[in-house]
Image (cartoon, grey):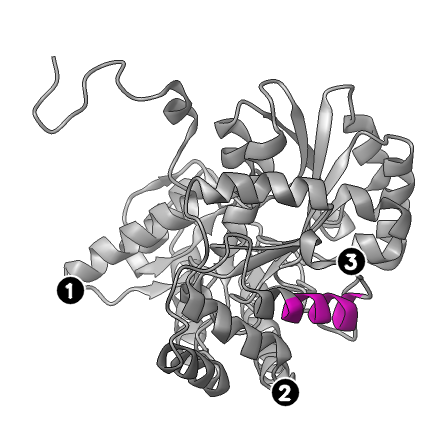
Amino acid sequence: MTSSNEVPDGFLAGCMDRLETPATIAMAQRARALKARGEQVLSLALGEPDFPTPAGVIEAAHRAALDGQTKYPPVEGTPALKAAIIRKFARENGLTYEPSEIMVSNGGKQVIFNAFMATVNPGDEVIVPRPYWVSYPLIISLFGGVPVFVDCPEESGFRLDAAALEAAITPRTKWLVLNFPNNPTGATTTRADLEAIAEVLRRHPRVHVLSDEIYEHLVYDGQAHVSIAQVAPDLKSRVLTLNGVSKAYAMTGWRVGYVGGPAGLIRAMASIQSSSTSGICSISQAASVAALDGPSGVVEVMRETYDRRRRMVVGALRQIPQLTCAMPLGAFYVYPGIAACIGRTSAGGRLIRTDEDFAIALLEEQHVAVVHGSAFGKGPYLRLSYATSDEILVDACGRIATFVAGLT
């Protein structure tokens, strides 16, 4: 029997058993519930820039609306935005694409969804370096695919080792997911790393690559981002290069992701999108043209601010004796280790058996929201986003220090 508010047993599709709420969203929901009770919560749980969308981008959206660009757009993206994306790939990544090789989606997540829905059959394997963004294995599993995780240890800078990659490839492997700069660790890859990975892929021609480069502009310490399709142009026909405007241009709510890849796969992905969401908001697409073609100075200002915050947060966390904290080289996350805190009891009487216990107790007792590392496949760690104000970061790090000092 079910209540009037529940669906009948057996009514939901079996794939729903494999679909969980992402931990990042779940922790944000916990934080909002505390706020609703009147508590002051400092949230470092979501990877969302605290900067406003650049004024020129908003003005472009306004002009587009006034000019009547409010009709159904093409499924795969407006010609203007596809042209801007082609210019972007050529200018910043040394990659040449035709319009038939470009597609626009509702954020990067829909690109991934479209790609895996179009290609993953039950039992197909997708290699995902670990730690990983929470949505990769969820989407893979939704279509009956099998996520195969390759560990990227802290001692190696959370980078993907080519030998470990090759050991994970089987006759069932269809995709390799690359996400560098990485969410959640902030790890990056060097050209040498990508050249070694490319050598492995040449020995396994059936394996394709989804290269998620959404954080490409957020690299530090003199690094330059490099795309695998640029390092290995002979593999370009097997690579989907994914990006978007959300992180670099503080446009998370505009919901624009894009991808360059082989025309046949792009057609298949567009066919799926045409039967789901269809084309992307025309106003958002006009705004994205302005973002991609606009001055780069606004992105550099954000990057410099994140760089300063990165050093500040890592410095503060390293002052807490029970924590370890690698210096991230990209994105806007830190990934401190809390192994020394496991098995202890918080000042509020909560036993810390896992990093999830730590995150929940920290939220309940000090009102700081972070995400436990085991949600990204590797604990005991925490993911903290430093895409928020200096004031909040200083306060949050102080509360974390107080929480850890109270462990017995």
Residue on which disc 3 sits: 227
Q: How many circles with numbers are drawn on the protein?
A: 3
Residue depth check, mark 3 versus mark 1: number of the one nearer the observer:
3
Count residues near mark 3 (Cα–Cα under 10 Å), then give few for <14, some for 14-19, many for 20+: many
Q: Residue at x 38, y 76 (%)?
A: 68
Amino acid type shown at disc 2: Gly
Q: Is residue 403 above or below residue 88?
A: above
Residue 406 within the segment the image draws in magenta:
no
Q: Quadrant of the N terminus?
A: top left
Q: Which residues are magenta?
A: 83-93
Give whichever of 298, 400 is nearer the camera: 298
Between discs 1 and 2, the one toward the N terminus: 1
Residue 297's label in the rendered image is 2
Mark 3 in CB contact with mark 1 (< 8 angstroms): no
Amino acid type shown at disc 1: Gly
Q: Residue at x 45, y 87 (%)?
A: 55
Give the image location of residue 169, x and y in percent: 78, 26
Secondary structure, magenta segment, majority class: helix
Cα distance in 3D space between marks 3 and 2 = 22 Å
Between discs 3 and 2, the one toward the N terminus: 3
Q: Is residue 157 above or below residue 80?
A: above
Q: Residue at x 66, y 62 (%)?
A: 328
Cα distance in 3D space between marks 1 and 2 = 39 Å
Residue on which disc 1 sits: 38
Give the image location of residue 108, x and y in percent: 54, 53
